[in-house]
Image (spheres, rainbow, N blue to C red):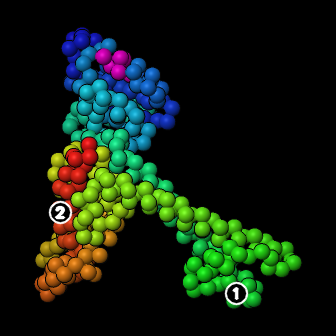
Amino acid sequence: MNLKHPNNQLILGVDTHLDLHVAVLINTIGQVICTAEFDTNSTGYDKLLRWCQSFGHLTKAGVEGTGTYGAGLSRFLSSQKVTVCEVNRPNRARRRLRGKSDPTDAENAARAVLADEAKAIPKMQNGSVEAMRFLLIARRSAVKARTQAINQIRALLVTAPDDVRLKYLKSSQLACIEGCNNITVLGGSTLLEMLSISLNLLAKRWLNLTEELKIIDKNLKEITRTTAPNLMNQYGVGPYVAATLLVTAGDNPERLKKESSFAALCGVSPIEASSGKTVRHRLNRGGSRVANNAIWTIALIRMRSDPRTQQYVARRTTEGMSLKEIQRCLKRYIIRGLFPIILNDLAVTT
């Protein structure tokens, strides 16, 4: 058999890294054709494709890390009409038996596609949803840093001298920040001087991060309202929640064949948890925990103020269901309703 015949159907496996991608080509009967390394830039991607085509016809590619190091390569191969499949990390049992190396990982990626184990289509990461992801990353880090700043201010004030603690440690967060921001000199000793500098810097950091969050939230609201107006009109869905769900779905949510796939991706798909005479389900603990939290936020808002949801909770409670089980059902119901809306909104904007 001529392994370099142009009619050969080939499958590519790629182990992705920051500077170099390791690629392995196999044919449809599992024979390894060749292994090579390529730079992670447009020139390297072109060389990789020409290298593949020199051995035959490239039909599919299994790429590790399509959301990180392999994002650029995935977009390039998709633009060249190559079906790209997202490959998870290699099977641990197989890795223990065969060892660990970049060519081995690349070969395993190709074989996962050949065996039809890797089916997931990667996110395109090239539209408005990807822009939302940028804003969400900046927002989460700003929120975390701001929380750390106020916690550190309170920790310093708790152990500060009595007169300083009584003057600046306030129950109101904003009052505490304003007081520390206006500190000039607390005293002549080194301890008080360093305390005043630390409190002042932390307060200014908190205020700066608050301004950053205002800018981020303004842009997030605008882009979310433009991209998904129908989703934003749903009860309990705000800009942050909507953007989180859109980012979880991706710029090309049609890769999710049905709403149950999206439910699993958000970690709200029910899993059998029966034992003995007890028949019950629990929530899937996998999937995106950020998306799961967004769905929980919607459920909580509806349980507090939506009459229909309150009636549902009351009925389920009389049937003997626990609060966790009711929330599980609500989360699944919410996903079932929101997924077609997300598809419609993104279909219109794209």
Q: Amino acid at mark 2?
A: Gly
At 28% across and 37% down in the image, what residue appears? Answer: 85
The x, y position of residue 229, in whole percent, is: 27, 58
Taking the magenta stretch, the answer to whether it contains residue 126 is: no
Task: Give, as a single range, the part of the protein colored magenta.
Answer: 48-53
In terms of secondary structure, where does tag 1 sit? helix
Would you say the magenta stretch is mainly helix, strand or loop? helix
Q: Is residue 269 above or below residue 173?
A: above
- Looking at the image, can residue 245 be seen? yes
Query: Crowding at label 1, few (<14), some or many (≥20) Cα neighbours within 10 Å?
Result: few
Judge by depth and name the residue closer to the eye, 51 or 203. Answer: 203
The x, y position of residue 151, in whole percent, is: 59, 74
At 17% across and 85% down in the image, what residue appears? Answer: 314
Task: Read off the residue under disc 2.
Answer: 337
Q: Is residue 207 above or below residue 302?
A: above
Give me the C-alpha separation between circle 1 and circle 2. 52 Å
Q: Amino acid at mark 1?
A: Lys
Query: Crowding at label 2, few (<14), some or many (≥20) Cα neighbours within 10 Å?
Result: few
- Residue 155's label in the rendered image is none
Judge by depth and name the residue closer to the eye, 117 or 201. Answer: 201
Task: Read off the residue under disc 1.
Answer: 167
